[in-house]
Amino acid sequence: MKKFLILLLSITLLTSCSDDDDATQEGDIVGTWVLVEANNIPGYTVNECTGQSTITFNADNTASSEFFSSVEGECVSETDTGNWSSSSDSQYTIEVPQLGEVTGTVAFNGNRFTFRPNDFPASSLTFQRN
């Protein structure tokens, strides 16, 4: 269960959109995003602790994240770094450390985006621009 959650969170770290998006357009992923929703991830909910989780996408196609989880009643964080790139309009192929390439969709809605991995289509994570 924990490996599934880490996989899904790692996937979101490396999600992307194309470099040629205008910074003011909906769909521009460059910036810092906060986790606001997790759907169909067994044993995981967004709460006061996990809701502190962030992902930062940089214009140079690098990214960093800090994800929070409750471990034995304490809120702890784990950081990671990676790269991102676009594979098409809404379909993104991303490189996940130790797993290789993963494909999923990113849907933008105002100041939010939702990532849904193709291998787990019932699961999704939603982030809001910070």
Image (cartoon, grey):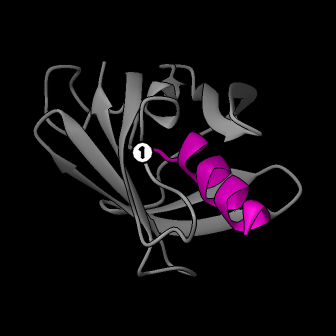
Callout count: 1
Residue 2: say if magenta: yes
Residue at 13%, 30% in the rendered image: 25
Residue at 60%, 44% in the rendered image: 14
Left or right, residue 19 beside residue 111: right
Residue at 46%, 44% in the rendered image: 16
Residue 94 horizontal/vertical position (percent): 62, 55
**Magenta stretch: dominant SS?**
helix
Residue at 42%, 39% in the rendered image: 47
Q: Which residue is mark 1?
A: 46
Residue 109 horizontal/vertical position (percent): 13, 47
Q: Which quarter of the rendered picture does the N terminus lie within?
A: bottom right
1 over 23 or under it: above or below: below
Left or right, residue 47 beside residue 1: left
105 over 110 or under it: above or below: below
Residue at disc 1, secondary structure: loop
Residue 8: say if magenta: yes
Residue 63 horizontal/vertical position (percent): 61, 27
Which kind of residue does numbered mark 1 sit on? Val
* Residue 82 visible in the shown view: yes
- Where, by quadrant of the figure, is residue 74 drawn? top right
User: Depth check: 68 or 128 in front?
Assistant: 68
Magenta part of the chain: 1-16
